[in-house]
Amino acid sequence: MKGLRIGLTLRVVAVIVVLGLAVFPLYWMFVTALTSNADLFGQDARLIPDFSQFGVFVDALADGKATGWLLNSLTIAAGTTVLSIGLGIPLGYALSRFRFRGKAVMTIVLLFTQMLPEALMVVPLFALFRRFELLDSLTGLVLANSAFVLPIVALILKGAIDGIPNELDEAGRVDGARPFTVLTRINIPLIAPSIAASAVIAFFHAWNEYVFAVTFIFNPEIQPASVGIANFIGELGTPIQTVMAVAFMFTLPAVVFYLFVQRYVVAGMTAGAVKG
Amino acid sequence: MKTLPFHRRATAATSIIALTAALLVGCTSDSGSEDGVTTVTFAASTFGDPGRGPQLLEWLDEFNTSQNAIRVAAAAVPYPTFGQTVLTQMGSGRGPDLIRFDMPEFEAASEAGLIAPLDDVIDVSKYKLLEQPDKFMIHGGVRHGIIFEASNYAMFYNADLIPNPPTNYQEFFDTARSLTKGDVFGLAFRQTEAEEAGVWQDIFNYVYGFGGAWSDGTNLTINSPKNLEGLQAYKDLYDANVIPRGADAATFRRMFAEGKVGMELNNGGYVTATRGQNADLNFSVAPIPFPVRSQGSILAPIVINKASPAQDAAATFIRWALEPENQVKLQEILGASSVATVTERSAESLQETPFLTVFDELTPSSLPQIVLGFEAKTPDIRKVVVQNVIAALQGTVDLKTALDRAQQQATELVG
């Protein structure tokens, strides 16, 4: 009994430490946003937010620019997630279940794309997007981000489908199911946790992406928040509290998305657990 | 086959996300001209500056309301990646129509043939251009830019903390050391690789202020004894812990505005920016107290993108900007900076900012922060020099070895 209590205490402490490490940067952003100039450069760091400074959040939202940036980021991230998952599932399924010439090479090429830094791709992609008139549009950014994140999504999902016994697919086929039905009715529900994990990766990649966004978008009205926040950094000065306020708001939708998807990760993992 | 409840929920969630994304993407449109009005995009990192940025946007609006055919719109390109972003866009045949460049990027863009010649669209004989900065706008007899801002470097000091500004390097060092206590620092300058361009601007004043130079016009002279002397002075201040180490320019400039930093070497544009952050700060300006009266200056040309489909409209804007009344307005927005043409400072400006004349008097001894004779290679040389100087600051190598290494690496680069 005593051993159980010590184990529980240790687990609680470990959770608190990990939670603290994860939440503290967010909290620090919030505190900095609500710190006056005098306190900001004072000798002692302020640990408690000064809510009398809350106007910085109101001011940041007042002209509607920050809201627009967040909406643009949401569009890009949602579009990238849907597209990369939509294409990643059949690609992962094909790599896992079908035999075709060049399959091994294709898998290696998919891995290879993950080793290319984004900066290396900016100029060729820019020229390509210019030809197809995809510059200065959110559609272009969704495609660019999806192209980068699709290989990793496909490889994650391939690994997940590899783990499903082939007998389940065969049983479906015996019942008259076509490959598409086998994929959608048998495989997808079983790999739901991996789909959710891939969605998190795709969403966060697109949400944080900066290099493509700053280069491919010229119109300030369709800039995402990652670029919008950088616009506050001036040559001669930076309003630190405003940057922190917008950055804090920038993190919230991503956290909400993760919490939303996490439910499905858990639901997928426990689905069927009570079946005989 | 029985559909699992989870499956239905997941399908519904995916459908909602997909529909939202499709609707939002569908609602977005690319920018373009509308109702016969030509839209000209103008990229300038100064649009984001506190104090100056909003006033510059109002100045653009004055042009927009002065006629109906052209609309100049600010293109928001973040300052930290301004040069890279705009040069990438221009190199790929797109980018803003008008750009306010800093000199290293101007030289690189010019050599790469990315800038439209201005000789046929702007008759400079109509304007009384400032000769010293304007000569850097011409390459091989072809005019590539018009000065948007020329701003000399001087010493800014907090007049409450420093009643009498230092007049030589030793006094400068002693003042910085005596002021540094608690949360107040005597001096601030850039010292991290993340601010490569800024470090280059700062060390330029130490090199030239101690009689050095990056080149003799034909050969690089990065490791010359005078350069070593100037950069040793810079390193001595770093080693003396009189600066907020690790603080970036945005932070220490805010600290200066809050009275937490005593001195800073900066250009005339900083006057308006500082007032924009703290209108009550009692500060003044004096020449940099180094042995030789020679310092850097920010020369920022306005250029037309060669790939711009609206070059005529862009030239119309530049001609408007060169009109005397618009030059005066621009100068008042830019603070202590000069503009393309010779302008008279108003009595009100001089009364409000008596030290404006300090900047004006420094013009003959100021130089753009490029490597003379190697102008287009300046960004590459800058990278090598800054990397090696920072290595010396951090103690991984002694300064002389660092400069010798920089000389060798830069020489290999320029061929």
Image (tube, rainbow, N blue to C red):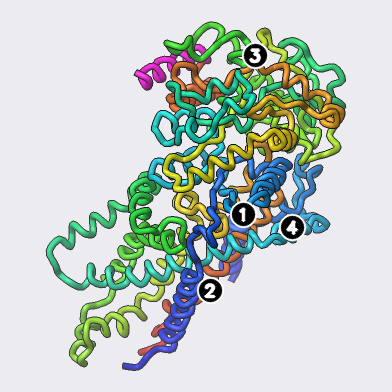
Label 4 packing within 10 angstroms: few (<14), some (14-19), many (20+) = few
Local SS, label 1: loop
Residue drawn at point x = 23 percent, y = 59 percent: A107
Q: Nearer the viewer, mark 1 or mark 2?
A: 1
Q: Nearer the viewer, mark 3 or mark 1?
A: 1
Callout 4–callout 2 Cβ contact below 8 Å = no
Of the 4 image quadrants, the one containing the C terminus of chain B is: top left
Disc 2 target residue? A260
Disc 3 target residue? B365
Disc 4 target residue? A59
The amino acid type found where label 1 is placed reads Asn
The alpha-carbon separation of the residues under discs 1 and 4 comes to 32 Å
Disc 1 target residue? B68
Q: Chain of mark 1?
A: B
Total residue callouts? 4
Examine the image and state in which quarter residue B275 appears.
top right
Of the 4 image quadrants, the one containing the N terminus of chain B is: bottom left
The alpha-carbon separation of the residues under discs 4 and 2 comes to 29 Å
Q: Nearer the viewer, mark 1 or mark 4?
A: 1
- Identify the main secondary structure in magenta: helix
Q: Chain of mark 3?
A: B
Residue A194 visible within the image: no
Q: Is residue A135 left or right of residue B203?
A: left
User: Which residues are the magenta region?
Assistant: B399-415
In the picture, the disc for residue B403 is none
The amino acid type found where label 3 is placed reads Ser
